[in-house]
Image (cartoon, rainbow, N blue to C red):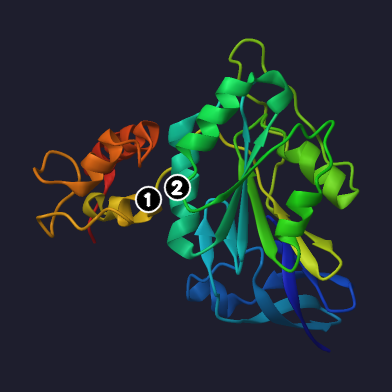
Amino acid sequence: MIGYGRIIKGVGSFYDVIDSDGNITRTNVKGVFRNKKITPMVGDVVDFEDDNDGARIINIYPRSSELSRPPVANATAGVIVCAVKDPDLAPILLDKMLINNEKVGLKTLICFNKCDLADEETLLTLKDAYKGCGAGMIFISALNDDLKELEDFISGEISVFSGVSGAGKSTILSKISGRDLQVGEISEKSKRGKHTTRHVELIPLGKDFILDTPGFSDLDVVDTAPEELWKFYPEFREHSDCKFTTCLHLKEPYCNVKNAVREGKISKLRYKNYRYLYEELKSTYKKY
């Protein structure tokens, strides 16, 4: 029998594939893919054959998008879950997640969670800092609030939920999906979240899908040359008509981006993050 469906979970060398009727088949991979060093990803659309020897993936269709962390194919939207407190927000990490989503063309929503723990000034500062980042924003307390705005955003999409450990991602996904996903606590010693999600899993919600991904405490900007970094800051692009076409918006004179920062049109926090990430990429980026 030949089947067609989408990979919703990968554990070890096995992949669970769901078809249009909601049937799930556990498969492994034909040797031809291993020989070509092609690894299936959660989100892949595949053909598989199922016989007395078990089910095997025989074809992987071209991907419309591909994220390396989390390793997900064919996603169309990204939800970045950030706690405003407990654990404290890490703006550098948030910028890295935004950049990686921007690179693969995902429409993105920042879900600032645990807003009941923060004062109004903190929330207004965040809203002002990220208003030009190209992503939507919502401010919630997942334990107490209605999640309709978030549910409207993911409707009709294959949505990747990502974020640091302890930010409340599993709580949000449990409420949306109706599944009792494991929820972690905050380590009192490190003030960081404990990892609760152990694998990447795509959860069917009617005709939509959401992807639950492991929390993390660090992340790299993927395959980005330092001189290209500014292009993934949407608010920089609006002010990039500088005197010098090669302007990196750092030390160059007559820079419209730096002028926009001074005039309050670009967030000082976002510009500070850009300078930090530029230096980080200078020391880590390798040309091939």
Q: CA distance from mark 1 to mark 2?
A: 5 Å
Instruction: Identify which residue is drawn at 24% across, 46% down.
Output: 257
Which mark, by number, is residue 266?
none
Residue that sits furthest to the top in the current view? 189
Q: Amino acid at mark 2?
A: Gly
Judged left or right of residue 108, residue 96 is left
Q: x and y percent of residue 90 in the render?
A: 50, 29
- The answer to whether residue 152 shows anywhere in this view is yes
Q: Which residue is mark 1?
A: 235
Residue that sits furthest to the bottom in the current view? 1
Instruction: Identify which residue is drawn at 67% across, 29% down.
Output: 166
Q: Which residue is mark 2?
A: 132
- The answer to whether residue 186 shows anywhere in this view is no
Q: Are marks 1 and 2 in contact (CB under 8 Å)?
A: yes
Q: x and y percent of residue 215 in the render?
A: 63, 38
Question: In this picture, is 34 found above or below 184?
Answer: below
Looking at the rendering, in which quadrant would you find the C terminus? bottom left
Q: x and y percent of residue 283 in the render?
A: 23, 39
